[in-house]
């Protein structure tokens, strides 16, 4: 169920350049991972990512994340401005008698053990709450959700941590697919901060393991979508994109050399979805270099938010050429494909377009002058739920900006076999 955000969001610029210690590698959408150690860790943690299921497995030791300092494993990215971070979360392992092992979605001022921070926390019994430290290295500045407000039985569950200005908000998705707020607290931090996933065993030398699936991290946005962000690498983006929503219209501004080859570089407004769906919108594209035919607006489905994700997309060029493209294997150029040239209609800028998922089959269509849907292409692409569905724009030129507009958006269940399991995480 869609719950529209009541808070007016002020969009800040997404920082593309990530400060990463030498020799550390990307872990999915996160720039690094490390044990944050206050001298009470006792065993080394680790973070891995499975792109086929879009699952981060975070294993951590440490006596706790609390008091004046923290001991845990953390996968993180440097971030500026507002954000919304959501995921399917669980926690297991550690000592069977230890209730306070916990998986966390976290924002920290820095990577020192005593940093100012805000975090969700999910225990073995599924108790879900919020905690914070508002002054570095200060036990007295710690706080947490009142016991009476903490729901239980949320292991596993889908959870969300949102920052709007200095205010942080924690929510979980209930059985009716509605976001339920648990707590909010003001914790001032100075940009850039660190946002990510953490696990502590709550016992020195023990290891607890958290799984985070379908991780969504972006700038908050209203309407049917949940968030937006640049997807790509800095030297192939060249300029920061943005997205706004007003009066039912998304305006998406994106740079990037292309959405093709082994990775993609573009701006994306998205929401997490399970099961079959239909996404319909009136779509237009403009801007970029006048000589660049391949600027494009896209309706898209992606397995994850990494640049090399498996995906299916419509693509609408400046001249209105409309077609479908896909990548069936993570970061594999040879798995890319697109609609045969002879099947691509032109002159469809602007136009009404549709992207459907029926099991593993994706179908692209446009509405003709008679108001009838005309199928252009279909292709089988295997993705594991949850996936990300949304609106994308690439300038097809590093450093240039193209602008796509998407209006009259419908994102609904298709009503075909399996649609009873359809879920929109908004």
Image: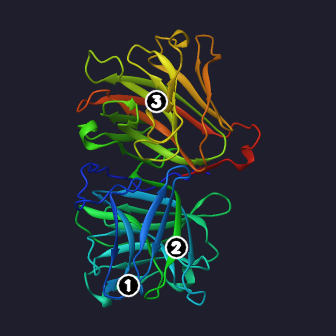
Alpha-carbon neighbours of circle 3 within 10 Å: few (<14), some, or many (≥20)? many
How far is mark 1 from mark 2, CA to CA?
Answer: 15 Å
Q: Nearer the viewer, residue 283 or 408?
A: 283
Mark 2 vs mark 3, foreground winner is: 2
How far is mark 2 from mark 3, CA to CA?
Answer: 37 Å
Q: Can residue 313 be seen in this snapshot?
A: no
Q: How many marks?
A: 3
> Is disc 1 placed on a helix, strand or loop?
loop
Q: Nearer the viewer, residue 410 or 344?
A: 344
| Location of residue 193 (image quadrant) | bottom left
| Location of residue 356 (image quadrant) | top right
Of the image marks 1 and 2, the number of the one nearer the N terminus: 1
Relative horizontal placement of residue 227, taking residue 395 as reference (left or right)? right
Residue identifier under label 1:
41
Asked if the residue under mark 3 is in contact with the one under mark 2, i.e. CB atoms within 8 Å, the reply is no
Residue 388 point in image, percent of width and height: 52, 45
User: Which label was assigned to residue 209?
Assistant: 2
Residue identifier under label 3:
298
Relative horizontal placement of residue 149, taking residue 422 as reference (left or right)? left
Q: Nearer the viewer, residue 414 or 70?
A: 70
Of the image marks 2 and 3, the number of the one nearer the N terminus: 2
> Is disc 3 placed on a helix, strand or loop?
strand
Relative horizontal placement of residue 286, taking residue 406 as reference (left or right)? left
Q: Vertical placement of 53 versus 308: above or below?
A: below
Q: Which residue is at a point 39% across and 29% down the rendered structure image?
A: 404
Q: Which residue is at a point 61% across and 59% down the rendered structure image?
A: 178
Alpha-carbon neighbours of circle 1 within 10 Å: few (<14), some, or many (≥20)? many
Alpha-carbon neighbours of circle 2 within 10 Å: few (<14), some, or many (≥20)? many
How far is mark 3 from mark 1, CA to CA?
Answer: 46 Å
Of the image marks 3 and 1, the number of the one nearer the N terminus: 1
Residue 410 point in image, percent of width and height: 58, 35
């Amino acid at each position: 169920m869609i719950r529209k955000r009541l808070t007016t969001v002020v969009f800040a610029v997404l920082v593309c350049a990530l400060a990463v210690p030498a020799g550390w590698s990307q872990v999915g959408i996160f720039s690094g991972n490390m044990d944050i150690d206050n001298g009470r860790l006792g065993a080394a943690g680790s973070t891995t990512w499975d792109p086929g299921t879009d699952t981060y497995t975070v294993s951590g030791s440490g006596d706790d994340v609390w008091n004046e300092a923290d001991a845990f494993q953390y996968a993180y990215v440097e971030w500026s401005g507002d954000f919304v971070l959501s995921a399917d979360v669980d926690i297991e392992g550690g000592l069977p008698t230890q209730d306070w092992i916990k998986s966390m979605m976290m924002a920290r001022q820095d990577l020192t053990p005593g940093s100012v921070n805000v975090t969700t926390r999910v225990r073995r019994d599924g108790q879900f709450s919020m905690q914070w430290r508002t002054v570095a290295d200060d036990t007295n500045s710690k706080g947490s959700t009142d016991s009476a407000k903490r729901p239980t039985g949320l292991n596993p569950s889908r959870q969300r941590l949102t920052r709007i200005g200095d205010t942080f908000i924690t929510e979980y998705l209930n059985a009716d697919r509605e976001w339920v707020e648990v707590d909010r607290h003001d914790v001032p931090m100075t940009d850039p901060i660190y946002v990510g996933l953490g696990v502590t065993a709550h016992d020195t030398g023990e290891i607890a393991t958290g799984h985070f699936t379908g991780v969504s991290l972006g700038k908050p946005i209203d309407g049917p979508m949940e968030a937006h962000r640049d997807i790509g690498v800095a030297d192939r983006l060249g300029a920061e994109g943005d997205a706004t929503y007003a009066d039912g219209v998304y305006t998406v501004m994106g740079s990037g050399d292309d959405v093709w080859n082994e990775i993609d570089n573009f701006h994306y407004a998205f929401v997490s979805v399970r099961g079959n769906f239909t996404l319909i919108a009136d779509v237009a594209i403009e801007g970029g270099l006048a000589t660049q035919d391949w600027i494009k607006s896209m309706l898209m489905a992606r397995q994850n938010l990494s640049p090399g994700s498996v995906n299916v997309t419509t693509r609408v060029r400046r001249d209105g050429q409309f077609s479908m493209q896909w990548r069936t294997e993570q970061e594999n150029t040879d798995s890319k494909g697109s609609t045969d040239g002879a099947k691509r209609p032109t002159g469809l800028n602007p136009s009404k377009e549709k992207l459907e998922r029926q099991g593993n089959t994706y179908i692209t269509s446009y509405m003709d002058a008679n108001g009838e849907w005309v199928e252009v292409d279909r292709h089988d692409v295997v993705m594991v739920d949850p996936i990300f569905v949304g609106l994308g724009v690439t300038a097809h030129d590093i450093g240039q900006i193209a602008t796509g507009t998407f209006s009259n958006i419908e994102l609904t269940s298709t009503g075909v076999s399996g649609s009873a399991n359809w879920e929109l995480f908004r």
